[in-house]
Image (tube, rainbow, N blue to C red):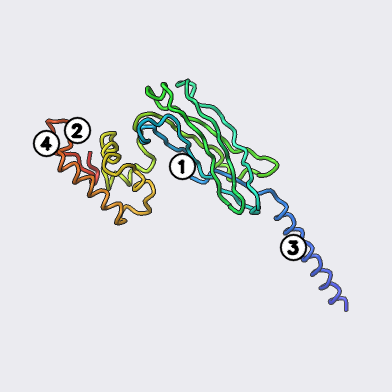
Amino acid sequence: MKNILYFTIGFLLIMTACSKSEIDTWDARPRVWFTNSNDTTLFSFYTQPEGTTESVVEVPISMAGRVADEDRTVTVKDLGSSPFNPGSRYEIVSAVIPAGEVTGTLQVKVYKTENLEEASDTLNFEIYGSEVFEVGLSDYLHHAIIISSSLAKPSWWDSTADRYVGYYSEKKLEIIYTVLGSDEIFSSASSWWSDDVQIAIYQLNQYCKKNNIKYHPDDEDVITFDFWSN
């Protein structure tokens, strides 16, 4: 009889603990953080249609926790821009996790200002806790947007990219935008061996060959997008 009593008490204690755990879990505020492990987004007005003077840059945000049936605002603070290149104009448009979603975006409107003709500027942002959200992964709470009016080395052009399209140069990036219209085929590629990427590389090399594109007129060879090429 005592064994049955002990078993019953133990069972009730376990159920109570489980119930409390579930309540704590569902009552806890969801957590948010910037999605990308790379904490920098590059944006250049050079890549936009001619005449563009303003644009909205989007940075993805992730959430863990309860999904809501209404839009929820994420608290993102503007930490300022670089003190070495004053004159930039920008503003946070919104930072929202939409209803029914576990991801959202920080939207920042940037303007093409004169200081960007001379050098790029870095805009810094940080996610803060609020009554709606707690902060998530500590290494993913800061994000920087680098804005410029000229070409800048994109984040996808790393040591792996060097093996397929060669070393970075502004001239090569200009060719990519001239031939392909953007660098999205590379920035969004899941594999360098995908058909789309290989076709794009072929098109770039054909363009350089047919149009005799060189770094300097007296160069012997045209520019190539190939293994560790210049």
Q: Is residue 222 left or right of residue 134?
A: left
- For mark 4, what is the residue? 220
Identify the secondary structure beneath mark 1.
Answer: loop
Circle nearer the N terminus (3, 2): 3
Q: Residues within 10 Å of mark 2 (few under 14, many from 20)?
A: some
Q: Which mark is residue 18?
A: 3
Going from N to C along the chain, the mark reached first, 2 or 4, is: 2
Residue contact at pointers 3 and 2, CB within 8 angstroms: no
* Residue that appears at 57% across and 36% down: 126
Most foreground residue, 101 or 173: 101
Query: Where residue 61 sits: x, y (%)?
Result: 55, 45
Q: Secondary structure at mark 3?
A: helix
Q: How far is disc 3 from disc 2 in space, using C-alphas?
A: 68 Å
Q: Which mark is residue 215?
A: 2
Picture quarter containing residue 162?
top left
Q: Amino acid at mark 3?
A: Cys
For the residues labelled 1 and 4, the Cα–Cα distance comes to 38 Å
| In this rendering, position of residue 32 left or right of residue 207 | right
Q: Residues within 10 Å of mark 1 (few under 14, many from 20)?
A: few
Looking at the rendered structure, which numbered label has been put on residue 38?
1
Q: Earlier in the sequence, mark 1 or mark 3?
A: 3
